[in-house]
Image: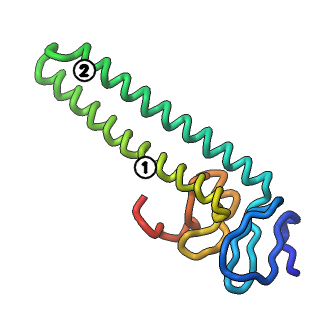
Amino acid sequence: MWKSPRSDHAQDGATLGTAMCSTKIRFFSRVRMVVVLTTREARRFRGKLEAERKVVEARLAARSRDEQETVRDESGVGDSVDEASLLYDREGDIDDNDLDQRTLVQIDRALRRLDEGTYGVSEVSGKPIPVERLEAVPYATTLIDEQPLEPA
């Protein structure tokens, strides 16, 4: 059995499929099994994903409240310059909301992948995603130099 430089990762022969054992989440390839995350790492990333989800949901809720207050406070008041400024701000909020909605979809997808035992494995190449990338973008589904299978 080959042992990787990280003492908690190992590789050996296996068949296609995914599985969750009591200590590690594994991805099976045709040739060998790649141990992607320990149970401890999986719990930590689940916590990061759930915390990120709460932050994004809070941002969406705050923007919604702000928009409702602005509409209520500004309706029928001001000139065309004020209205143009208000429209510009709303368009920015719409763009930000779209980005946050897409991020929520990616977070939910990452949480499902954790449940399925495929979190931390590229959807494109099947190679392990470096932990450093997952630390930076916990909902990443590809290696940094790969294009996602479908638009995010």
Classify mark 1: helix, strand or loop. helix
Q: Say what amino acid the circle numbered 2 marks.
A: Val
Classify mark 2: helix, strand or loop. helix
Residue ID at (56%, 62%): 141
- Image color mode: rainbow
Q: Nearer the viewer, residue 2 or 13?
A: 13
Which quadrant of the figure contains the C terminus?
bottom left
Q: Height in image: 59 above or below 17?
A: above
Provide the residue designation for mark 1: 102
Q: Residue 111: image x %, image y %? A: 60, 52
Which quadrant of the figure contains the N terminus?
bottom right
Q: Say what amino acid the circle numbered 1 marks.
A: Arg
Q: Residue 122: image x %, image y %? A: 59, 69
Provide the residue designation for mark 2: 71
Q: Height in image: 126 above or below 132?
A: below
Q: Quick one: which residue is furthest to the left in this view?
A: 80
Do the residues bearing badges 1 and 2 touch, measured as CB atoms within 8 Å? no
Q: Residue 80: image x %, image y %? A: 11, 23
Q: Is residue 40 left or right of residue 92?
A: right
Q: Is residue 150 left or right of residue 87?
A: right
In whole angstroms, how far apart are the C-alphas of marks 1 and 2?
25 Å
Q: Quick one: which residue is furthest to the bottom in this view?
A: 31
**Residue 29, disc:** none
